[in-house]
Amino acid sequence: MPISIDVFNSGYKPIPNPSGWTAPQQATWPATTATLIAGSTDALLVDALITTVEGERLAAWVQASGKSLSMLYITHGHPDHFFGAGPTLAAFPQAQFVALPEVVAEAHRSAQSLEHWRGWLGGQFDENAAIPTELESEGLEIDGHPVRPIALGRSDGVINSVVHVPDLATVVSGDVAYNNIHMWLFRSTPETRSEWLDTLEALAGLGPEKIIAGHKDPGAPDDNAQRILDQSRRYIEDFDKAVGRSNSADDLVARMMDKYAEYGNPYTLLAAAASQFGT
Ligand SMILES: [Zn+2]
């Protein structure tokens, strides 16, 4: 039996009161994906968004697939990829809610420090969200097709795992690669940016043809792995160089917008730039 991959995209959601945001347009949170890997009857969902409202939309979308969800797998421990799991877990009580051990540890740490998340999306998510438990088997499969969770390394601050589906030459990448959206370099340092580039190399090493990025512009042309790997590397390298050449956050934003004006979620760049200059 063939397996299929379908992607739910949350789109952009308003950040009601972002500090430091003076642009006329509404500040937003990056569009985020959840991915359903399905066989004839059984399915595995990768990631679960953050707000309660989008979590409900996600649960309805999975139900509409007609598949029976056996597992909800979380790629990394940032709340925007798992705090919205509640409605899906309620709709599919038999589904295991899991992540790799190092991700479970990060998820617990994230749930203990919600200060920034309240500032961005406070009141919209469940502060007592369920935390995934440790995945016990690494040998997952859907209808006989292997599905491999792999811890690749650090990307935007935490250990990131990906889900490799070799028979479809596809990797669901969490936050390792982004698709046409400004990348989350908030509080990044030269060292963490270099680590993220190493993690991208590890992703490239899996040889994917398609990458389903955890943050994807809804208008992105495709999931072409080469394009996504190239743009993700280039963005981090350009940001790194631009930090060294800039005198202020505004200067850094202007340098990046010269090259990436078309990318989604400029608020991400503003937050990243401000964090480089201690503002
Ligand atoms: Zn993310």
Image (tube, rainbow, N blue to C red):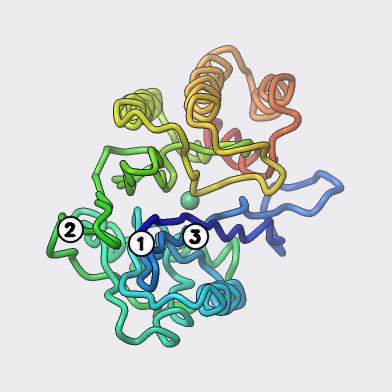
Residue identified by numbered label 2: 101
Residue 129 appears left or right of 240: left
Residue 134 appears left or right of 202: left
Which residue is farthest front?
A: 1
Marked residue nearer the N-terminal end (1 or 3): 3
Front disc: 2 or 1: 2
For the residue carrying disc 2, how many other residues have a C-alpha within 10 Å: few (<14), some (14-19), or many (20+)? some
Residue identified by numbered label 3: 34
Q: CA distance from mark 1 to mark 3?
A: 19 Å
Query: Of residues 260 and 65, which is closer to you in this image?
Result: 65
SS category of the residue bearing label 2: helix
Query: Of residues 106 and 60, which is closer to you in this image?
Result: 60
SS category of the residue bearing label 3: strand
Marked residue nearer the N-terminal end (2 or 1): 2
Residue 161 point in image, percent of width and height: 30, 47
- Type of amino acid under label 3: Ala
SS category of the residue bearing label 1: helix
Q: CA distance from mark 3 to mark 2?
A: 20 Å
Q: What label sits on residue 45 in the rendered view?
A: none
Q: Name which residue lies at 35% across and 61% down.
A: 110
Which residue is farthest right?
A: 24
Residue 26 vertical position relative to residue 197 in the rendered view, above or below: below
Residue 20 appears left or right of 176: right
Residue 119 point in image, percent of width and height: 58, 63
Q: Name which residue lies at 44% across and 34% down.
A: 188
Q: CA distance from mark 2 to mark 1?
A: 14 Å
Residue 130 vertical position relative to residue 98 in the rendered view, above or below: below
